[in-house]
Image: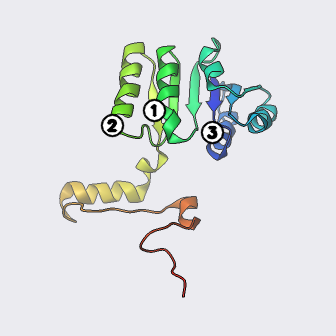
Amino acid sequence: MRTAIVGAGLQGNRRASALRLSDGDGLLLVADIDPEAAQRLAQEYGCRATRRWQDVIEAEEVEAVLICTPPHLHASIAVAALRRGKHVLCEKPLGRNPTEARRMLDAARESGARIKCGLNHRHHPAIRQAKLWCDEGQIGGIMFIRCRHGIAADIPHRGDDAPRSG
């Protein structure tokens, strides 16, 4: 599938790397508001770079768009891509609220294009087990849940469990 990435940060680089491993998929275009970031990633994968996500949507040869931007941009980019018949893989969260997510799903339904959310942990064995326990009623109703996993576990967070000085 002929693909473009919007967002040349950490996730954009990860998705580009995965494309390299896929037979037949090709990265055609990288968009990022930071032209140097877009150019670096595009140069590494031998494709074009742009500052404007709209260029990705307008590119007739692009069949799929990987959205790796901050969440406040997800809905507008995804809806525009879907309305042009492009398939979309959007990093989580799909939308900032149910209304944004619904707009994206409606655009996919209307165009016949597919949209998926890059939420790879839903298949993690520990998550599946926790869901099974909930479904079976073994642990009671969920009142609150907080998880840290992978690289995020090493990032300092503010909150009740944050280290206190003194």
Measure the C-alpha gap from mark 2 to mark 1.
Answer: 15 Å
Q: Is residue 73 left or right of residue 14?
A: left
Q: Position of residue 135 (x, y in %)?
A: 22, 54
**Does the residue at mark 2 contact the one at mark 1 (Cβ under 8 Å)?**
no
Residue reaching furthest to the front:
166
Sequence-first disc among 2 and 1: 2
**Quarter occupied by residue 127:** bottom left
Q: Position of residue 100 (x, y in %)?
A: 39, 32
Amino acid at the residue labelled 3: Arg
Within 10 Å of the Cα at label 2, are there few (<14), some (14-19), or many (20+) other Cα atoms?
few
Residue receiving disc 3:
15
Measure the C-alpha gap from mark 3 to mark 2.
Answer: 25 Å
At a point 24% along the width and 58% down the height, the residue shown is: 134
At a point 65% along the width and 32% down the height, the residue shown is: 22
Q: Position of residue 89 (x, y in %)?
A: 52, 32
Sequence-first disc among 1 and 3: 3
Can residue 66 be seen here? The reply is yes
**Quarter occupied by residue 166:** bottom right
Amino acid at the residue labelled 1: Lys
Sequence-first disc among 3 and 2: 3
Q: Nearer the viewer, mark 3 or mark 2?
A: 2
Amino acid at the residue labelled 2: Pro
**Quarter occupied by residue 128:** bottom left
Residue receiving disc 1:
116
- Circle 2 SS class: helix
- Circle 1 SS class: strand
What label does residue 98 carry, if any?
A: 2
Decide: is 157 above or below 161: above
At a point 61% along the width and 21% down the height, the residue shown is: 54
Measure the C-alpha gap from mark 1 to mark 3.
Answer: 14 Å
